[in-house]
């Protein structure tokens, strides 16, 4: 019974980690590149709109739920005697907390809040300077969040693999 709970929580952690890793990846691979390709004043206004809408009920489960699900799955795996799988799952939670959640609140959110209260410059050169400074730094930190989110996803996968191996070995005996 505990193994089923652990595997169910692990499946939830996998889905949430995949969703948030894909979210961050999409920004680095396309959204920011697309915004960089338009007039800076338009990019600033668009990013202000995106940032105003991103905190929503669709985004929140993956963003906040990933470390919760991974921690609960790690605890359940530990309780089910799947020690290696549990440590991989707990490492997934830690990688997300330290490499994605922490930089979000320490860097990306303050940058977003500062951009939100900035009037879009009417001078093209001023808008270009503002956007370039914001975009370069924000994208660098988002790429870091992407890498750690992908690491989290990979560790959840490793945990599921290890949990499955333990289950298969016990059935073979």
Image: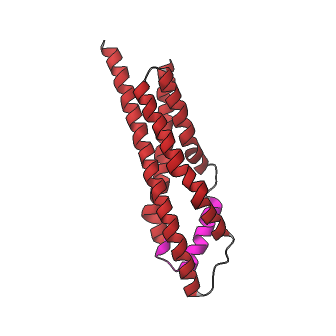
Camera-side residue: 34 or 150?
A: 150
Q: Which segment is the magenta one? A: 35-53
> Residue 48's spot in the image, x, y percent?
62, 68
Image quarter (top left, top right, bottom left or bottom right) of the C terminus = top left
Q: Is residue 38 left or right of residue 114?
A: left
Q: Magenta stretch containing residue 25, yes or no?
A: no
Whether residue 78 is visible:
yes
Residue at the limit of the structure toward the top, as seen here: 173
Question: Where 36 sits versus 52, above or below?
Answer: below
Residue at image position (48%, 65%) is: 139
> Residue 27's spot in the image, x, y percent?
48, 61
Question: Where 121 sits versus 9, above or below?
Answer: below
Q: Is residue 162 left or right of residue 96?
A: left
Q: How is the image coloured?
A: secondary structure
Residue at image position (63%, 70%) is: 115
Residue at the limit of the structure toward the left, as seen here: 172
Number of residue marks? 0
Residue at image position (55%, 86%) is: 125
Q: Main secondary structure of the magenta part?
A: helix
Camera-side residue: 110 or 64?
A: 110
Which of the 4 image quarters holds residue 28? bottom left
Camera-side residue: 35 or 130?
A: 130
Which of the 4 image quarters holds residue 127? bottom right
> Residue 4's spot in the image, x, y percent?
48, 23
Question: Where 38 sits versus 27, above or below?
Answer: below
> Residue 47's spot in the image, x, y percent?
58, 68
């Amino acid at each position: 019974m505990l193994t089923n709970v652990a595997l169910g929580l692990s499946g939830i952690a996998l889905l949430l980690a995949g969703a948030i890793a894909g979210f961050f990846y999409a920004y680095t691979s396309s959204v920011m590149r697309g915004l960089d390709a338009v007039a800076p004043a338009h990019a600033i206004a668009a990013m202000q709109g995106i940032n105003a809408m991103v905190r929503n009920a669709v985004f929140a489960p993956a963003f906040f739920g990933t470390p919760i699900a991974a921690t609960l799955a790690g605890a359940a795996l530990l309780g089910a005697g799947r020690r290696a799988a549990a440590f991989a799952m707990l490492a997934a939670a830690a990688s997300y907390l330290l490499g994605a959640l922490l930089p979000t609140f320490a860097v990306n959110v303050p940058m977003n809040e500062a951009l939100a209260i900035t009037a879009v410059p009417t001078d093209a050169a001023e808008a270009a300077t503002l956007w370039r400074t914001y975009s370069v730094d924000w994208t660098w930190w988002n790429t870091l969040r992407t890498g750690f989110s992908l690491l989290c996803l990979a560790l959840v996968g490793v945990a599921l693999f290890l949990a499955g191996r333990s289950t298969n070995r016990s059935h073979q005996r």
